[in-house]
Each structure stands twice: as C-alpha cells, then as structure tokens.
C-alpha cells in the first residue's frame, strides 16, 4: 500500500503548514511524527513504556508510510541494525526505554563516532533495583557524553515537533550526529492531550546521503574503506592522533548544531519572567510542574521565573549564564536521583552557591507543584529576606 504525500522542507512542515487539533497520547504523537518524517527504515524491540509507539510505527509500515520495518532480537540488535541502515544511506528511526537504553549503550557512541544521523526516541523510566517501570530520567545522565545531540520534551507537542526537527538538524552536512529525543515515560507517553498537527499528506523532503560527511556504504565505498579498523586498532602515535582528531570533530559538529537548534527548535531554552530574582530551571515534565509552582507562588506574592531547557546536548551554557546573571535563587527540580541537570547548571554559571539542588523525585513518584514551592520558601528563609519577593 502506498500513500500520496507531498514532500516539503522542514521549516515549512514545522512552522508554516496549517495545524489542526488532535487529542492524542505522547506515543501517538511519536507515530504522527514518523508518519510525516519520510522514513526509510524503522527497527523495533518492545520495552515499557516505549512499546506502544513502535507498535504504531509498525502500523504505519503496513499502511505504506515506511519502506521497511521489523522487530529485532533485543535492544542491542536494534541499535546495531539501525546503525547499519544509516551507514547504507537511509533515514532511520527507532526508540527504547530504561534498561533497553543500557543494554544498547555500546552503540550510541558508535553512531556518533561514525557521524550517522540516527534519530532515536527515548521514553525514560527507572533502571535500578528495586525494579521499576515508572517514569524517571536517570538514563539521560548515562548518555550525556556519548556524542549524540539530546533534546528533552516537556509534553506530547514537544515530542512531535522535536522528532521532526531532529531530522532537519542532524541531516545538515556539518552536523550529522545522532539525536536522542527524550520524554519522561508515562507522564508523556500515556497521557492524552491536545497536540497541533500539520496535515498528514505532507512529509519531509527525502534524505540525500550524498551530502553526508562520511560516504554511505555501497560497492564503491565498502566498510573497510570507511571504518579504517586496521589503522585505529594499532597502538601507535598515528592511531592515537587519528582517533583524537576524530573525537574533536564529533564535539565540533555538536557545536555547529547550535544555529540549527535555534532555527528548528526556536532556541535551546525558553524563558518566562526572566527578570525575577527567583528562577526555576527545568527540563522535560519538570517544566510543566514548575509552571504550576510559578502560578501558585504568584498568588502568594512570590515573584518567580522559569527557564525551560530544550537542548541538553549541546548544553546552553552561555544562554543559562546570561539568563541567571541577576538571580539570587536558582532552583533545579528533577525526575531523577542523581541531579544531572543541576550539575550542568552549576558548571555553567558563576556563583553557583545560588543553585538549590531539587526537589528530586524518582521511582515513579510525582512532583506536585507544592513541593517546588516549599523548596523556594526554604531558600527564601535561608536568605534572611535578602531576596526580592
């Protein structure tokens, strides 16, 4: 079965096409993005809470929206096979969650090291003992230095837009790095909300692998000519220099992505009431809870602002430093025990004793706005009234 879709540029699809309301889950939003992404191949393996999204992608294959799709043996097999499809010049998509992320961990820096524009959706969940399928995003901490770009969706609308934007960003010849698009599982994947969708008879322009910085594998460019295993496996100065320079290029490519993040995501951060003396910095679902906390504090006469972090890699150090320059209290609520976002914020700004690490919830615990407000009040009490209210 084939579907008649008109190919359009990413900017047109994301910002210019008229949109209509749809009341859907985050998993369905992923499927809707894939429907319009002009995907060559998707490969799946089930793990909660990601399973539904890739089941829906399988339905899209049956309807003719993808050229190929299958279920692999396990998560590592998925990520290895999707890597092969990308090496062959295809536009690819996959998804995973929690323990699946850890089982496939070896492949993520391989994607980056071979400069492949893989887009992978992560539906974050607990990974530690005692076993938990509940939402938390500690797995993002493990991926920060794999070389991939990392975007964190607040809600289903973000998830839809970020997946499409990911292709527009990664397929720029000077970028060409894998992109992880993250959402907090269940909170986003299984919640139904209004998502504004462009027409489903539109799709992204096809991917042209001729513009890849690494030639796609074919009969003229077999793997041995591209991967250079005999060189990089030797223990000598030439090998070290080649490896180091390539690592530097991966890092440089991430820096070059910033201007495309500005264009297709509308920037790495969003700021609300940025002149407030109290600022909350959050990403993912914690942003929504922080919005409620800001509203509640306003009713109590406490003036607070919000900085939403959309791009975790590359991290918006300069933007956050500028936005927090005059703040006295900076609160970083997170859905994980490790506090990876707080560490990033502290590393980005001067006088980081202003940063309050928390609240943090994990193991599936909710984060009511009240506990964010309580943390702000504790910080205000500690300041002895020195903070403007």
Image (cartoon, grey):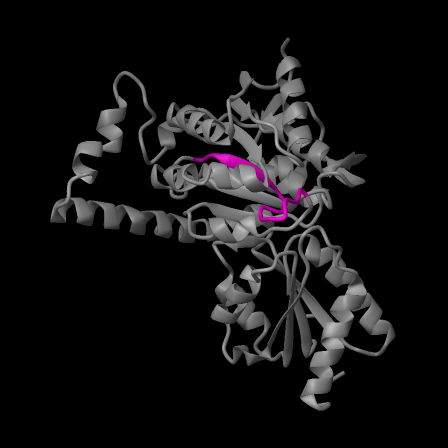
Which span is picked out in magenta? Answer: 117-133
Q: Quadrant of residue 21?
A: top right
Report whether 242 appears left or right of 346: left
Q: Quadrant of residue 239?
A: top left
The answer to whether residue 319 is above or below residue 208 is: below
Asked if residue 147 lies in the magenta stretch, the reply is no
Whether residue 167 is visible, yes or no, is yes
Residue 262, position as x, y percentages in the image:
54, 52
Which one is in front, 162 or 19? Answer: 162
Which one is in front, 35 or 232? Answer: 232
In which quadrant will I find the C terminus?
bottom right
Asked if residue 120 lies in the magenta stretch, the reply is yes
Residue 267, position as x, y percentages in the image:
57, 55
Magenta-drawn stretch, dominant element (helix, strand or loop): loop
Report whether 244 appears left or right of 123: left
Residue 99, position as x, y percentages in the image:
55, 40
Which one is in front, 262 or 96? Answer: 96
Whether residue 387 is visible, yes or no, is no
Residue 264, position as x, y percentages in the image:
57, 45
In which quadrant will I find the N terminus?
top right
Q: Residue furthest top?
A: 1
Q: Residue placed at 67% from the left, 52% from the top?
A: 363
Q: Residue placed at 73% from the left, 54% from the top?
A: 365
Report whether 239 appears left or right of 247: left
């Amino acid at each position: 079965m084939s579907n008649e879709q008109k190919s359009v540029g990413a900017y047109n699809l994301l910002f210019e096409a008229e949109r209509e309301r749809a009341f859907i889950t985050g998993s369905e939003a992923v499927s809707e993005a894939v429907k319009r992404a002009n995907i060559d191949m998707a490969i799946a393996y089930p793990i909660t809470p990601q399973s539904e999204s890739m089941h829906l992608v399988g339905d899209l294959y049956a309807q003719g929206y993808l050229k190929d799709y299958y279920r692999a043996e396990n998560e590592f097999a998925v990520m290895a096979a999707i890597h092969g499809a990308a090496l062959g010049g295809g536009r690819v998509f996959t998804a995973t969650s929690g323990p699946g992320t850890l089982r496939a961990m070896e492949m993520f820096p391989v994607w980056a090291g071979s400069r492949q524009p893989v887009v992978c959706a992560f539906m974050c969940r607990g990974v530690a003992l005692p076993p938990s399928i509940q939402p938390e995003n500690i797995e993002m901490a493990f991926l920060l230095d794999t070389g991939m770009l990392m975007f964190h969706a607040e809600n289903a609308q973000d998830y839809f837009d970020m997946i499409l934007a990911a292709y527009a960003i990664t397929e720029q010849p000077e970028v060409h790095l894998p992109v992880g698009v993250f959402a907090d599982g269940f909170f986003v994947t299984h919640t139904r909300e209004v998502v504004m969708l462009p027409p489903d008879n539109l799709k992204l322009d096809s991917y042209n692998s001729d513009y890849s910085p690494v030639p796609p594998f074919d009969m003229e460019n077999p793997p041995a000519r591209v991967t250079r295993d005999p060189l990089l496996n030797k223990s000598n100065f030439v090998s070290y220099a080649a490896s180091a320079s390539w690592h530097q290029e991966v890092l440089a490519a991430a820096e070059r992505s910033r201007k495309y993040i500005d264009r297709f995501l509308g920037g790495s951060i969003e700021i609300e009431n940025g002149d407030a003396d109290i600022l909350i910095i959050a990403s993912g679902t914690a942003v929504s809870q922080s919005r409620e906390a800001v509203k509640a504090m306003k009713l109590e006469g406490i003036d607070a602002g919000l900085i939403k972090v959309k791009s975790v890699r590359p991290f918006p150090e300069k933007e956050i430093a500028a936005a927090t320059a005059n703040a006295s209290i900076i609160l970083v609520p997170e859905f994980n025990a490790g506090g990876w976002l707080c560490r990033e914020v502290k590393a980005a700004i001067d006088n980081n004793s202003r940063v309050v690490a928390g609240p943090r919830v994990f193991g599936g615990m909710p984060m009511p706005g009240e506990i964010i407000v309580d943390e702000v009040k504790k910080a205000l009490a500690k300041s002895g009234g020195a903070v403007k209210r």
